[in-house]
Amino acid sequence: MSRIGKMPISLPAKVTVSVDKGNLVTITGPKGTLKQQFDKDMQVTVENNQIVVKRPTDQRHHRAQHGLTRSLLANMVTGVTVGFSKRLQIQGVGYRAEKRGNNLVLSVGKSHPVEFAPPTPDMAFDVDKDGRGFVVSGMDKAAVGQLAAVIREARPPEPYQGKGIRYEGEYVRQKAGKAGKVGKK
């Protein structure tokens, strides 16, 4: 039995779950509503204020889907109650971020400012006062991570001077620069 899959998911107060036929699960909480379609073989039920996921057989496919379904459901419950966020930092002289309306505008050494709009209404940007860091937040964990990755691609950290956009706590290995021509005339 899957260690993750067999653990029930506790439902906090103010969270409602409905499972339609075909395993379309809708979870509603204080931050909003998330819907996701799961594998029809998985049995998703709500019992005693907990979500329980069961699998029909011990086939490899069912074992894989068991833990995945449970993890995705747990992320949905966390998303509608607390939400998710990714913090990014900007390093480099003249590099900065600012918020214009709901959009994030980055000045990262290109000939033009790079602008990002939140793909869904529940997603938001929060920029530090010094413009050196910002937070991407929202209900859907996958969408927050994807948007953070797309923003990071605007100017990924380079290994020689370390300039660019990086996740908070990300280690960028520094390379030595050119040694130059030593002793040759």
Image (cartoon, rainbow, N blue to C red):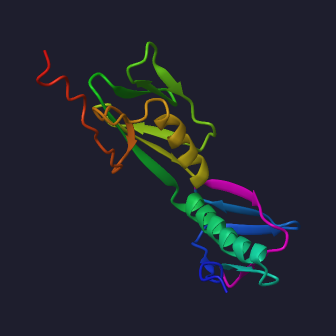
Left or right for 62, reference 93: right
Please say whether residue 44 is one of the residues in the magenta stretch. yes
Q: Which one is in front, 107 or 10?
A: 107
Q: Which one is in front, 173 or 185?
A: 185
Left or right for 162, reference 41: left
Place of residue 4 in the rendered image (x, y in percent of width and height, measured from the top left): 60, 78
Place of residue 143 in the rendered image (x, y in percent of width and height, measured from the top left): 60, 47
Identify the residue at image location x=62%, y=69%.
Answer: 71
Identify the residue at image location x=33%, y=37%.
Answer: 159
Indicate whether 30 appears above or below 171.
below
Q: Which one is in front, 173 or 122?
A: 173
Identify the residue at image location x=18%, y=22%.
Answer: 181
Query: What's the magenta region?
Result: 31-49
Place of residue 121 in the rendered image (x, y in percent of width and height, measured from the top left): 62, 40
The C terminus appears in which quarter of the rendering?
A: top left
Please say whether residue 46 is one of the residues in the magenta stretch. yes
Residue 140 in view of the camera? no
Identify the residue at image location x=45%, y=18%.
Answer: 113
Can you tell which quarter of the image residue 120 is in?
top right
Indicate whether 90 appears above or below 44.
above
Can you tell which quarter of the image residue 23 is in?
bottom right
Q: Looking at the image, which residue sits at the far front? A: 185
The N terminus appears in which quarter of the rendering?
A: bottom right
